[in-house]
Image (cartoon, rainbow, N blue to C red):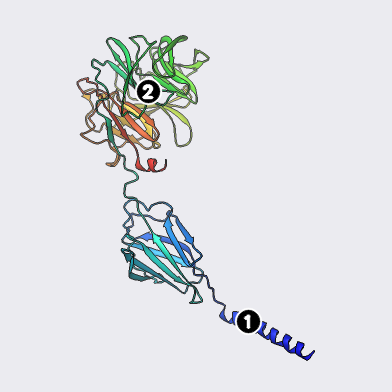
Amino acid sequence: MKHKFLYLTFALGLILTSCIGGQTTGRSNNPKITTFRLTSKNTKISLSDVKYNIQDANDNNGTITEKDSLPYGTNLDSLIVVATGNKLSSVKIFESKNGVKTKEHDGADSEPDTVNFSETVYIETVAEDKKTKMTYTVNIHAHRQDPDLYDWKIVNSEPFNTSGIMQEKVVLNGGNAFVWLIKTASGISAYSSSDNGKTWQQKTVTGLPNDIDLQYTLKAKDGLYIAKQENLYKSTDGLSWQSSLAGQKVNNALFEINGEIFGINSTERKVYKMAGNLWQEVAIKTTSGRLPEDFPVSGASVWTDISANGIAKVYIAGGEDKNSKLLNTVWLSTDGAYWIKLDNSSTSLFSPRKGATIFQYDNTLMLVGGQNASGLITSKYHIVSPDYGITWAEPASNVALPSPMFAPRYDAQIIVKDKRIYIFGGQTSAGTFKREVWTGAKSILLWKK
């Protein structure tokens, strides 16, 4: 019994000693970094939105990397580090050269030095207990290319050698191939490209009359459409066309809004919507029930797209009114019945013109080319509107079409496909058709593919 008592007393003593020792120490043995961020002394560079991956391994080693590269223009050789954890007793930061640690920085300094991240940086932490350590390998990168840069380049400088071109239209068919429709004195022909304009094959076009106006060929969800008086021509591939009588004369500005197809009779200034296989007049919300007197009847550019707020809109830019007056207006509508005129008479950038091409890209409207009263527009022929046609400005140097490589032109064909802009053809001041294909894209949009 005595021995049992002594054994129990000894065991209790060990337990009490252990507990008292733990309470005496009371310091964290966690050396992990929980917060990491970088700042730049360059006030024009903000790193506040950059996120980082902090990975901890079981052998007291870890890694830190950025989730996305730091912004373009960041100087990696002069960044300020903030690295914190749970009551760390010390944080040491080491620059390196060819894998060898060099300059040391105190991560707890209230006025820290800048650190060179051009090569691997090492961060050594010590827990509050001053015993447990952790080493992090840090590799940081910055974008080497301006994310807002538009990479313009020529895809094909001579896709075909057809001469005597009178009119052209490039569309995207149901098979996602470009079809370049061409009108000459001998009729309508076409070239097709399934590799984004690099190579072109001559094709035969059937079903279109020689006097068809290709300008307002519409690419809709269910096919391609061209209107000629009471006839409506439809195709799924841009090559084989079938005609039907649509009941009303439509000769201008085919467009599609929310899956519905619209056309305009420019002579009567009426708008029609396709109902079944027939045109149905739209009740235009004006006093006269017709389009306004200064609405374009020819030479305008038409583009339908989804704006940043998710609403489908049609834009009709420039052109001539019924009195052959050149316009510098943008008309927009969300339903074909109610139209808003954005008058640009207060700016000289959007001068009255016809034959310009309007399109939307990256939530911005762009206008390329055109003819004014003096002929071909040769300066400021590329303008942009960040507010969908309310105001216009010259594009920044990293956005603008390259001059003089990209020559001024009118009636250029533009398609936006897979986050890229494609520009086809167009005419010079002498009326000669440019046989070339250009493409451009905003760099950051391609990175997000």
Q: Work out whether mark 2 precedes mark 1 in sequence or the reverse, and give the earlier one.
A: 1
Task: Count residues near mark 2 (Cα–Cα under 10 Å), then give few for <14, some for 14-19, many for 20+.
Answer: many
Task: Count residues near mark 1 (Cα–Cα under 10 Å), then give few for <14, some for 14-19, many for 20+.
Answer: few
Residue 448, compared with residue 237, is above or below; it is: below
Q: Residue at x 63, y 81 (%)?
A: 18
**Residue 51 on image: x %, y %:** 44, 55
**Residue 301 on image: x %, y %:** 35, 24
Q: The C terminus lies in which quarter of the figure?
A: top left
Q: Residue at x 53, y 73 (%)?
A: 29
Confirm or deny contact between disc 2 and disc 1 (CB under 8 A): no
Q: Which mark is residue 171?
A: 2
Residue 237 occupies quadrant: top left
Say what amino acid the circle numbered 2 marks. Answer: Val
> Which callout, 2 or 1, points to the residue nearer the camera?
1
Residue 81, compared with residue 19, is above or below; it is: above
Residue 360 occupies quadrant: top left
Q: 400 or 266, which is in the foreground?
A: 400
Q: Which mark is residue 18?
A: 1
Q: The N terminus lies in which quarter of the figure?
A: bottom right
Q: 398 or 107, which is in the foreground?
A: 107
Horizontal arrangement in the rendering, residue 379 relative to residue 356 (left or right)? left
Q: Is residue 50 visible?
A: yes
Say what amino acid the circle numbered 1 marks. Answer: Ser
